[in-house]
Amino acid sequence: MANNEKKEAAAVQGKSTLVHDTVCLFVITLIAGVLLGAVYTITFHPIEKQKDKAKQEAYAAVYDGAEFKQDKDVDAALEKFNKDLAAGKVGSASQGSLSDVQIAEVLKAQVDGQDAGYVVTCSGKGYGGAVTMALGIDGEGVIRGIQITDCSNETPGLGQNSTNKDWNGQFVGTNTSQDINVVKDGSGSADAGTINAISGATITSSAVTRAVDGVFQFIASLQ
């Protein structure tokens, strides 16, 4: 009899301990969630503000002297084009399907109040992830400037060399009538629409080239 009472008491105590531990874990999780939410709320706007500042600086660098304006018709066309990209409906003769390319934003560039081309944020899939860039394209569809804004997932000393102007400057002067391709033999030429690959980083080189090809096709569809 006494043994049964002891067993029942132990069982009750075990259940009580389990309930206590569960409640404690729930409270700790709840507090952690609230704290994380508070940190996110506090930091979200400053982070977004800094991102926007960096983007505007990149646009100014790739299209000097211009002002940038959103356009509803361009936005609507871009939404449709991005769906076609993701569905594999957009391709390049030299690069194949461009389904990995994403065009995040296209703004009109204006000089002295007149439309003078576009600035674009876009990306292509590199060796370790997305390689993001800003492009400045004039009214004739020619690249005026390019800036790699994020290649942090690429290999240091190889793919991350895409930020070097000595390399990405090859794209300046290429235009929307061209099908840009990567070559490894050093024969790259803007006139021929060929880009010399970064040594040891052909995938990264192709990611940038594919993104440019995708943007060229979109801008050509607007002209």
Image (tube, rainbow, N blue to C red):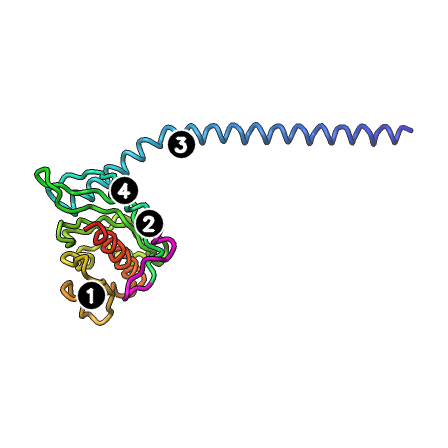
Q: Nearer the viewer, mark 2 or mark 1?
A: 2
Is 195 magenta? The answer is: no
Q: 39 or 5, which is in the foreground?
A: 39
Task: Identify residue type, mark 3.
Answer: Tyr
Q: Which residue is found at the position 37% from the left and 57% from the top?
A: 88
User: Looking at the picture, does residue 112 appear above or below residue 169?
Assistant: above
Separation of residues labelled 4 and 2 (CA atoms)? 10 Å
Q: Nearer the viewer, mark 4 or mark 1?
A: 4
Which residue was labeled with disc 1? Answer: 194
Which residue was labeled with disc 2? Answer: 82
How far across and how far down the image is residue 142, in percent?
Answer: 15, 54
If you read the primary sequence from the N terminus, does the residue marked by circle 3 or circle 2 appear first? 3
Q: Nearer the viewer, mark 3 or mark 2?
A: 2
Q: Which residue is found at the position 30% from the left and 64% from the top?
A: 95
Judged left or right of residue 19, residue 48 is: left
Which residue was labeled with disc 3? Answer: 40
Which residue was labeled with disc 4? Answer: 75
Q: Magenta stretch: give its range.
A: 82-96
User: Looking at the picture, does residue 50 appear above or below residue 170?
Assistant: above
Q: Which residue is found at the position 21% from the left and 64% from the top?
A: 195
Separation of residues labelled 4 and 1 (CA atoms)? 30 Å
| Image quarter hosting the N terminus | top right
Task: Identify residue type, mark 2.
Answer: Asn
Q: Residue 50 is drawn in which quadrant? A: top left
Task: Identify residue type, mark 4.
Answer: Asp
